[in-house]
Amino acid sequence: MSQAIPDKYRDLFTKRAFASLATLMPDGRPQVTPVWCDIEGDLVIVNSARARQKDKNVRRDPRVALAIIDPDNPYRYLEIRGRVVEITEHGADDHIDKMAKKYLGADKYPYRTASEQRVMFKIQPEHTTMMG
């Protein structure tokens, strides 16, 4: 059952708010990574590089959770539990540059390595919890 992001919390995706993304390791233990996040309609978008641990984890088990804390009020947050419904390379290079502009003020993502392949995870929220 999908659940839309409440309008009252969509502003978090326009701010320089970091998310903590939880994925599941092969043995079921959680793995958490700070990530930049975006929204496209009702899908949460996270950009990564192919073969990183979170990429391996979501390809094996698409269940994820994110916590996004408002940088202007740390007592206001949005927690999302859902599934990665699409993993795509299409548009991922442009998207990471868009995120670099939002989070760093840079026109291009400055940490790219020659060998990396960017991917986007499109996450369908199934449950949300909010505070503040």
Image (spheres, rainbow, N blue to C red):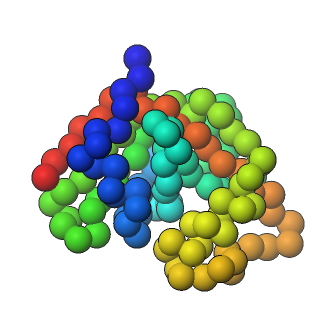
Task: Identify which residue, 80 or 105, lies in the foreground.
Answer: 105
Question: Residue 45: where, in percent of width, then height?
Answer: 55, 48
Residue located 48% across and 48% down the image: 39
Question: Residue 90: where, in percent of width, then height?
Answer: 78, 47
Q: Is residue 66 left or right of residue 79?
A: right
Q: Is residue 72 left or right of residue 51?
A: left
Residue located 40% across and 69% down the image: 16
Task: Identify which residue, 21 or 12, lies in the foreground.
Answer: 12
Residue located 29% across and 59% down the image: 69
Residue located 40% across and 17% down the image: 1
Q: Is residue 53 visible?
A: no
Residue farthest top in this picture: 1
Question: Residue 3: where, in percent of width, then height?
Answer: 36, 27
Q: Quadrant of residue 19?
A: bottom left
Q: Is residue 83 visible?
A: yes
Question: Residue 42: where, in percent of width, then height?
Answer: 46, 36
Q: Is residue 10 left or right of residue 45?
A: left
